[in-house]
Amino acid sequence: MKELVEFIAKALVDEPDQVRVTAVEGERITVIELRVAPSDVGKVIGKQGRTARSIRILLNAVATKLRKRAVLEILE
């Protein structure tokens, strides 16, 4: 799941070397934290949050296959 978010984020931003993804795993839930350069935050979130919503949908699809729950947090 972490690799998926990292791959998508690097494709969206202007500074892919600034992308940092960490996964905090619990028993049934995984929190994926995404950090990008301050100038790229808007690109990851998208208009009215559409890009972020799409990433979350893909993440939840993968998590469901693994019988887990995943949450994406976009940090500045």
Image (cartoon, helix red, strand yellow):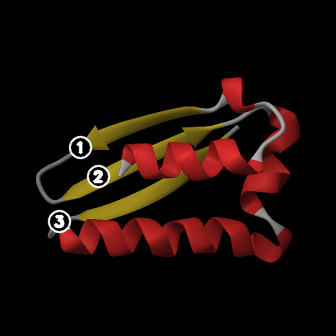
Q: Position of residue 32 (x, y in %)?
A: 42, 47
Q: What amino acid is at disc 3?
A: Leu
Position of the C terminus, as image quadrant, is top right
Report how far apart the C-alphas of labels 2 and 1 lie in the structure.
4 Å
- Position of residue 73 relative to residue 23, above or below, is below
Circle 1 Cα neighbour tier, 10 Å, few/some/many (<14 / 14–19 / ≥20) = few
Labels 2 and 1 touching (C-beta < 8 A): yes
Image quadrant assignment for residue 15: top right
Q: Which residue is mark 1?
A: 25
Q: Residue at x 65, y 65 (%)?
A: 52
Circle 3 Cα neighbour tier, 10 Å, few/some/many (<14 / 14–19 / ≥20) = few
Say which of 11 and 35 sits in front: 11
Which residue reaches farthest top? 17
Q: Position of residue 27 (x, y in %)?
A: 11, 52
- Using residue 37 as the reference point, say whether residue 19 is left or right of it: left
Q: Which residue is mark 3?
A: 66
